[in-house]
Image (spheres, coloured by chain):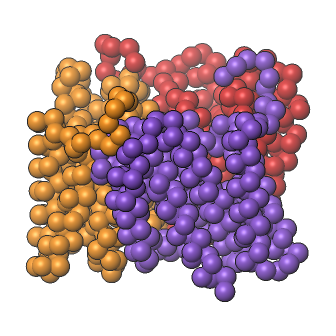
Chain colours: A red, B purple, C orange
């Protein structure tokens, strides 16, 4: 049943994005409640933008309090578990947690747009917006360079995943496999880009940023 | 009647947040119309996010033009009155105006969520989001470090206030007293934190930010 | 027929704001897909905020995929055409494209609010919010100083244009001419400010930012 799969994926994406908020909060030496706020906006930011734009109201977490509870639980458990990690390890984990969240939320966002009858190009855009939205808010608040503007194939992974979802949905007519294909493609591209420092040729060439 | 109290509090929160926008605009040497824009997004930002997420449409200030008029009036009056203030005094006032706005809007946001039947944890999150939203947008636009990420017990005050509102609402069943209790608790915690430079232990310990 | 005019203006504003995103992406050496994301949020950001606040749902680009297609086409065409430009020329063009987008979207936003029966002051605010919204998101993501906070008569141009639209709409009762008047006024003020380095007296005087 796609609905149960969807729900499980959504909870997983919520946990990993909350975790990415916790990791960034650690790097910024925030206190426990600031950390909770940062983890929350990261975890529910993308889905909130998605529901607002698609006209779903109220936004999902208002009627499903388990999302907020899950975020609180993630923070409470993550803080002691992550304490022994070194600075480098935190940075390494942050990028991987974010990649998993990107893959999951891209699939969910694109799928939700298709279910509501949106055209393919809109579904790709909704997927990318849902996938990058939470991390964008996190990075803007923390005054980091948003990952989507970095050159390591971040937006590319989301757009490729969205295209895979739309095409495989049209081909197989099955939402479940389309979502899994989208997640696998997005995650593999992003992890490979991190592993081998891939980047596309940048536009503008001469000067360094 | 809670509605009149709610309305008065909302107007007061609008004035103090508009004032916090004016004070920050002064520090950034913005011109009169840039100042008006910054004061406006600060004053209506939190309530706009609240109404969007809760699915209230259109957003409150579209049908109630008195909010925008009040913001214009606040800017027109505040500019000459604040001119003689020194740089330090402006910084001092900015933090206090923001604290009063935080307390007021946290109470209003959490109360509005409860009235619409949201669960307690959602009401706390809506309170915090409404309370910190306007100031967050103000600080992000002005490229300041968002106050909610500072360590001086900012998010903590909002979360404590939201919890007080939800608990006292469940206990007394009276929205009016619950809101006042929430405001008093939020404001006292935040002012005390500013006065005695409270901060919670930060997470991550060794390196300085 | 105002509707066809409105539609043409909206497409033009979308193209020029997408172009401003491309130009900024070039300055930041982003890759092709990051550039596409930045162009997209810039081009649809203002209209998305407008539709959300006014309670139009879903947001316009969900049911009108031609907007996203136009943005993709703009990026594909702009990248090779803009490649030979020097750094200074890119900065120069960015400010002009942004000014044209500001003028167009201010007129559209204020007009849409009036059509939905909003009061004059709300229409002015919606015009400014629609006009500055996309550029604001662009600049915040790219960690540039938001143009609306610069002193070169940016917010002033939008507010003046919005007032012209509301007044000429009340006077002539014709949406078409009111929108054109608003666009001309906004664009001329902003271009003149850029040309002769106009700025209003700033508030706060002594210290430099």
Q: Residue at x 64, y 68 (%)?
A: B108
Q: Residue at x 51, y 56 (%)?
A: B17
For the N terminus of chain C, which image quadrant?
bottom left
x, y percentage for residue C24?
A: 33, 32
In the image, residue C38 sits, relative to residue C43, either above or below, namely above
Q: Residue at x 85, y 78 (%)?
A: B172
Residue B43 visible in the displayed image: yes
Residue C66 visible in the displayed image: no
x, y percentage for residue B161?
A: 76, 59
Residue nearest the observer in this picture, B4 or B196: B196
Q: Residue at x 24, y 21 (%)?
A: C87
Residue nearest the observer in this picture, C79 or B16: B16
In the image, residue A113 sits, relative to residue C32, either above or below, namely below
For the C terminus of chain C, which image quadrant?
top left
Q: Quadrant of residue A5?
A: bottom right
Q: Residue furthest bottom?
A: B1
In the image, residue C53 sits, relative to residue A132, either above or below, namely below
């Amino acid at each position: 049943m796609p609905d149960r799969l969807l729900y499980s994926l959504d909870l997983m994406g919520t946990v990993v994005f909350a975790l990415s908020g916790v990791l960034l909060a650690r790097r910024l030496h925030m206190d426990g409640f600031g950390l909770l706020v940062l983890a929350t906006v990261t975890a529910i930011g993308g889905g909130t933008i998605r529901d607002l734009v698609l006209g779903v109201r109220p936004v999902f977490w208002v009627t499903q309090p388990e999302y907020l509870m899950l975020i609180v639980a993630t923070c409470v458990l993550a803080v002691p578990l992550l304490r022994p990690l070194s600075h480098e390890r935190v940075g390494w984990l942050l990028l991987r947690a974010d990649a998993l969240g990107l893959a999951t939320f891209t699939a969910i966002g694109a799928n939700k747009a298709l279910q509501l009858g949106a055209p393919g190009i809109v579904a790709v855009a909704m997927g990318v917006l849902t996938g990058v939205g939470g991390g964008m808010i996190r990075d803007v608040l923390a005054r980091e360079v948003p990952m989507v503007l970095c050159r390591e194939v971040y937006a590319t992974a989301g757009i490729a995943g969205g295209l895979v979802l739309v095409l495989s949905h049209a081909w197989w007519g099955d939402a479940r496999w389309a979502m899994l294909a989208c997640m696998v493609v997005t995650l593999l591209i992003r992890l490979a880009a991190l592993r081998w420092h891939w980047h596309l040729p940048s536009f503008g060439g001469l000067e360094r940023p």
